[in-house]
Amino acid sequence: MSVTGPLDGIRVIEVGTLISGPFAGRLLGDMGAEVIKIEPPGAPDPLRTWGQAELDGHHFFWTVHARNKKAVTLNLREAAGRELFLDLVERSDIIVENFRPGTLEKWALGYDVLHQRNKGIILVRVSGYGQTGPEAHKAGYASVAEAASGLRHMNGFPGGPPPRLALSLGDSLAGMFAAQGALAALYRRSVTGEGQVVDAALTESCLAVQESTIPDYDVGGVIRGPSGTRLEGIAPSNIYPTADGSWVVIAANQDTVFRRLCAAMEQPDLATDDRFANHVARGRNQDELDKIIGDWAATRQPADIIATLSEAGVISGPINTVAEVVEDAQLQARGMIADHWDERIGRNVKGPGVVPVLSDTPGTIRSAGSARPGQHNDEIYGGLLGRGDAELATLREEGVL
């Protein structure tokens, strides 16, 4: 049997809907895990209808988000459904859920019950605020988590309202931390034989990526706010207009890189100018330095700027639209613009490749999101659990499947 990735042989049960928990499931599936996606009968994951593009009535968030997953239907509110679920738990390694805390317990499927059936089971729980604390009971969305964590306060321009990114960043961050926790728990299980609970919160995931904001406040009372296109005190690292009206990013805030930038701009004296001679000085004179670099860039074409600076060892690059991203030669060479065969429309749909790239057991895209809920019911309930056709027919009639 061919190896599909480092998690080949690991089975994941995914319950819950939309983005955060299922994103963790996707990451595990990308690395070779068998992911069984559970949807309630008659109530498919709403993500099947998400995505801004539409073709023949189909949307395509699902195509990528549910890749490498097998779709089954199961009603966990019914006793027979819960028993099937527990039979799956016995044969699985990880459960990923993103219900409001207490939902599994309400269905008599808390971790104590799961552990009785499989002492090695790892329960990954993604929620708005975590499984404990005074706000644990609250539902959470990425937009609120980004705001409550302080992340959104730093976005935008000084004096303006704090906008959100045009995506659900908090969901993706929580999904990544949840997958990281699952891998750590798998390693620990290899030593002890015991599973555990991985508790990932949207708010905490947004908080975790905020660099020095908390110690800066604690020590100096600094409340970092929005800084537009740059980071305050980090210079030069900004976007600059070019001769054709587009923008390029130039990042040369490290002392050695700044000296290279000055030489490439044919203004080497700037490197020894007291205003710009070191990191602290450049931060204090950021506006003046940005104007000098902006004046230099404004007379040149973006390709010429990037080529000149790259040759000099200065970090720079374009600000691409998605149309330019999918044509990017570097991303294509790395397999990061990947095809997903979508059987609903009978053609490949492009999406992001598998990150990170492993040298010996790289992850793979083995299938796109399933075309219909319950597409793999017979394979999982019949093949894996050994249920007969008559029993499955009865379960369908009873609304369990």
Image: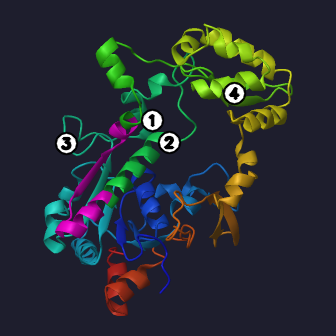
Quadrant in the rendering for residue 201: top left
The residue carrying pointer 1 sits among few (fewer than 14), some (14 to 19) or many (20 or more) residues within 10 Å by Cα, namely some
Q: Which mark is residue 106?
A: none
SS majority, magenta: helix
Residue under label 3, please give it.
132
| Whole-number angstrom distance, CA of label 2 to CA of label 1 | 7 Å
Q: What residue do we see at 45% from left, 66% from top?
A: 29
Q: Quadrant of the C terminus?
A: bottom left
Residue ID for mark 1: 143
Residues 97 and 1: in front is 1
**Toward the viewer: 25 or 258?**
258
Q: CA distance from mark 3 to mark 2?
A: 24 Å
Judge left or right: residue 95 versus residue 22. Answer: left
Q: Horizontal and vertical percent for residue 23?
A: 45, 55
User: Can you see residue 291?
Assistant: yes
**Marks 2 and 1 close (CB-CB < 8 Å):** yes
Q: What is the magenta range?
A: 184-206
- Confirm whether the magenta stretch covers residue 65: no
Name above or below for residue 204 compared with residue 395: above
Q: Is residue 153 left or right of residue 314?
A: left
Which residue is disc 2 drawn over? Answer: 168
The earlier-in-sequence mark between 2 and 4 is: 2
Q: Residue at x 24, y 48 (%)?
A: 101
Q: Nearer the viewer, mark 2 or mark 4?
A: 4
Q: Secondary structure at mark 1?
A: helix
- Give the Cα separation between the discs numbered 1 and 4: 40 Å
The residues bearing labels 3 and 4 have C-alpha atoms spaced at a distance of: 51 Å
- Location of mark 4 (residue): 260
Distance (Cα) linking label 2 and label 4: 38 Å
